[in-house]
Image (cartoon, rainbow, N blue to C red):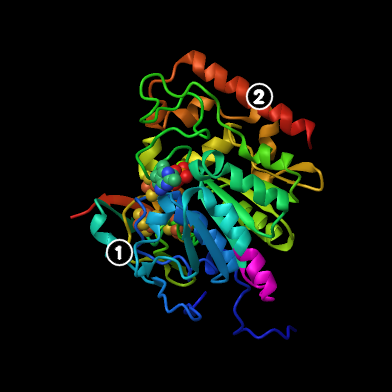
Amino acid sequence: MTTSNPQSPKPRPPLPYNMREVVLPGDAACPGCPIPMAWKVLSAVFGEKMILVIPACCSSVVVGAYPGNSLKASVVHVAFASAAAVASGIAEALRKRGITDVQVIAWAGDGGTADIGMASLSGAAERNHDIIYIMYDNEAYMNTGIQRSSSTPYGAWTTTTPIIGKTEHKKDVAKIMIAHGVPYVATASVAYPHDLYAKLQRAKKIRGFKFIHIHAPCPVGWRFDPKYTVRIGKLAVETGLWILYEYYDGKIHLSGPSRPYIDPKKRKPIIEYLKLQGRFKKITEDKIKEIEKYVEQHWEWIKRHM
Amino acid sequence: MVKEVQIVKTGIKIPLAKPKIGVAGKTGFWRITKPVIDYDKCVKCFLCEIYCPVNVIRVEPDQGPVIDYDYCKGCGVCVDVCPTSALKLVQEE
Ligand SMILES: Cc1ncc(C[n+]2csc(CCOP(=O)(O)OP(=O)(O)O)c2C)c(N)n1
Ligand code: SF4
Ligand code: SF4
Ligand code: SF4
Ligand SMILES: [Mg+2]
């Protein structure tokens, strides 16, 4: 005989139930935008108790113009290069006031992180402020019209690499953050919300500077049908191009979704990822070979540090 | 969430936006394609709700997914992630 009440509801999984309240419908994001997808996961972890510090980027537009805000959480709009500095200040102010249940999150694009915000990011990391810095990586300056950033991948078309695509590889910001010796660094993807959820939960418990690099396929800038945002995010992982991992206690911990792809034979051909995106329409065989080489080198680095 | 901002002594008012549904209006008007549900095929896996970027799908344990078409932008992400093809995109009238 069981004593449990037949009326009592089954335990509910954190996703999706905890994602329902904070990210409000009717924001200004383009259809299929990865940004609010990631915010839903953030909200499942922190609820309303988060302060997003957002420098100029698509996200500043997505939340809407005054007097409205599409998030039932606090948002501080700040000047481009300053996200990490402002977030550090807010975190220190909260600490002085004894407020411990609010998470300060710097939320910046790849331009605002890999290029323009790099100095303040490096400073905040070195001082080890108790914040989570999230770089959502749509691999170009989308808000101003798809200009290349240092995080745009090799071979990709942008409005400032219009003829032969970008001729340099993507800057690996997660690696730069690992070199800062901060307690937690992770890569994630909007296509893997459960993985991102677990990483945010871990980051939440760690005191000091946390950095999370979220791969965020953008239908407008990458030139794909908006229904494929998740599919493309998954293909990036399944081809081995985007590797999901965490770095703490001095080593790399490969995340579940990326584990099979340590074996190159299990990886899908990179063309599967490229062919869905108009930004790679003109890519040549030679360039695909170059991307494959780069991916292999990245995996070798990962394996050495596991 | 901060409810109000106290500006001690300065008298300066800081523009403080408030959470609002539809900051960009009724975004359902943007739609050129519309997701429709075949409830018989749905296995209530929640994936459509988890991924919907506009947060307009609620998978109810008894009913299955309910979409708020006032704000659904018709991106089709839910259709692409559905493992059983219970969702499909049709042309908006
Ligand atoms: C100091 C400064 N320089 C330039 C701009 C113009 N600007 C606004 S958003 C943006 C692009 C931001 O790109 P990214 O950080 O990658 O975010 P995304 O728009 O791609 O989401 C630029 C260049 C600015 N607002 N301030
Ligand atoms: S350009 Fe891309 S990242 Fe920016 S709002 Fe549109 S879909 Fe989102
Ligand atoms: S079409 Fe897009 S906005 Fe509409 S319910 Fe599906 S995922 Fe959400
Ligand atoms: S993704 Fe498809 S099967 Fe899963 S809950 Fe949604 S409609 Fe049902
Ligand atoms: Mg960007």
Q: Nearer the viewer, mark 1 or mark 2?
A: 2
Chain bearing mark 1? B
Range shown magenta: A90-102
* Mark 2, residue position: A296
Give the residue drawn at x 53%, y 41%: A234
Residue lying farthest to the front in this orientation: B10
The foreground one among A161 and A34 is A161
Residue lying farthest to the left in this orientation: B93
Give the residue drawn at x 63%, y 37%: A243
Three-letter amino acid code at disc 1? Answer: Tyr
Whether residue B85 can be seen here: no
A159 within the magenta span: no
Q: Is residue B65 above or below residue B9?
A: above
Element type at marker 2? helix
Give the residue drawn at x 50%, y 13%: A286
Marking on residue B69: 1
Task: Give the image location of residue B24, x and y in percent.
Answer: 30, 62
